[in-house]
Amino acid sequence: MPASRSALAAWHFSPGAINRLLPPWQDVQIEQNEPLRDGSRTVLGLKVGPIRIRWVAVHEQVKPGEQFIDRSIQGPFKQWVHEHSFLDKGALQSDLRDSVEYQLPFSPISDIFMGWKIRSDLAQMFAFRHRRTRDDLARHSQYSDRPRRTIAVTGSTGAVGRALCAFLSTGGHRVLCLVRGGSTLGPDEVRWNPTGEWDASKLEGIDAVVHLAGANIAEGRWTAARKKVILESRELGTRSLSEAIAKLNRPPSVMICASGVGFYGNLQDGLVDESAPNGSGFLAQVTQAWESALQPVQSRGIRVVRMRIGIVLNARTGVLGSMRLPFLFGAGGRVGSGRQGMSWIHLDDLVAAIQFAIEEKTVSGAVNAVSPRPVAQIDFARALARVLHRPCIAPLPAPIVRLMFGEMGSELLLSGQFVHPKVLLEHGFRFGYATIDDALSFAFGKMK
């Protein structure tokens, strides 16, 4: 690992580590995650086929900076003992050793029929875990000489928000989650109101705020009522947060606000960067209003980053999550002409880009959070089919898309743009997953 033994151990002992280690292609929910100490527990809800299994592990022989053991007391295995050891190899290098002893139910009969599959699944899972751990440590090491920060995040329960909060936690930062509901608040939760007044005094003195909240644009047809919800969730929510932050006596030094590449409208040809003008269409209208709502923060002199995010690749959520099942059944292929641009970014590169924007003070204004290699829709479909070992032969004609999804289908499925991350590249950001094949392979645990 590209970090000291103490940094490697600290990463694993952070509250966000369990989230970073769960394979994204599996349906796993964290039900309980107690701080690592002898006798504490981690409880996971694991879906295997149609059945949801509760997996309860007790932590034993916990030695901060050295090791800990997870022993399963309930779950899919008759026996499961997992020892995590952190070994010193010098100032900036260490070894991570995972030792697992397990026994299947109904062994030895189950070993004959399922043993090979379990071994293959574990090899796939640990290859993923080790790569993500290594990548996270490398990202954090870039800023290891800087003070740890307190960062407020809206939209922390979404796929991007959960990943970001976990990633920041493993870097030693304190994360404050801005939440709307719930009768009680945790020690690191602050209640906010996207559409009205709220008490922002608990944000005094924080270092940064990341605003990710907004209604799902792909949830149902775009009726007039639904379009109003989408627009107001971004415009009113952003303005409410901006005004509250601008009134603080000790405001954060930077605000990162999510936006989208839909800002540029439907562009079939050519590569566009952050200098391109606002396009036409509903999404272009939404993103324009979204970004304009940041004016109170900008007027206060706070550095603002308008992060125009492309299609985020995560195996079970968003666009990729909705495409996964049809492709597994061999029903994937070209949509419309297939020539429309898909500007995408792997989830891990997105959270790293947000960290980069927080730490690099010269980054401000519009920032395209996309891979430097956008692809046409048909090339995206072919890459996904390759990773899932399925054919790519089932076209979805444009008239069918319009009939099924209306305006939403026209803008989300039949339109697109080829977007270039000029600002990130000029400031030295390095993508971990620059090609669509690498990104999809990692998302589904198909690393070579």
Image (cartoon, rainbow, N blue to C red):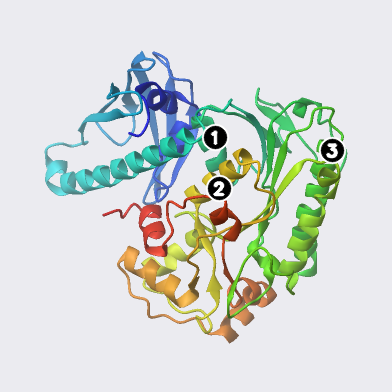
Looking at marks 3 and 1 on the same chain, the residue that comes earlier in the sequence is marked by: 1
Q: Which residue has dot 2 on it?
A: 353
Amino acid type, residue under disc 2 in the picture? Ala
Q: In 3D space, how far apart are the residues under numbered discs 3 and 1 (Cα atoms)? A: 24 Å
Q: Secondary structure at mark 1?
A: helix
Crowd class of label 3 (few under 14; some 14 to 19; many from 20; radius 10 Å): many
Q: Which residue has dot 3 on it?
A: 246
Q: Position of residue 80 (x, y in %)?
A: 26, 29
Crowd class of label 2 (few under 14; some 14 to 19; many from 20; radius 10 Å): many
Q: Secondary structure at mark 2?
A: helix
Q: Secondary structure at mark 3?
A: helix
Contact (CB < 8 A) between labels 1 and 2? no
Contact (CB < 8 A) between labels 2 and 3? no
Looking at marks 1 and 2 on the same chain, the residue that comes earlier in the sequence is marked by: 1
Does residue 393 lie above or below 225 as drawn? below
Figure disc tally: 3
Question: Residue 24 vs residue 408: left or right?
Answer: left
Q: In 3D space, how far apart are the residues under numbered discs 1 and 2 (Cα atoms)? A: 12 Å
Question: Residue 85 vs residue 205: left or right?
Answer: left
Q: Which residue has dot 1 on it?
A: 168
Q: Quadrant of the N terminus?
A: top left
Residue sitting nearer the eye, 297 or 335:
297
Crowd class of label 1 (few under 14; some 14 to 19; many from 20; radius 10 Å): many
Residue 411 at least partly seen: yes
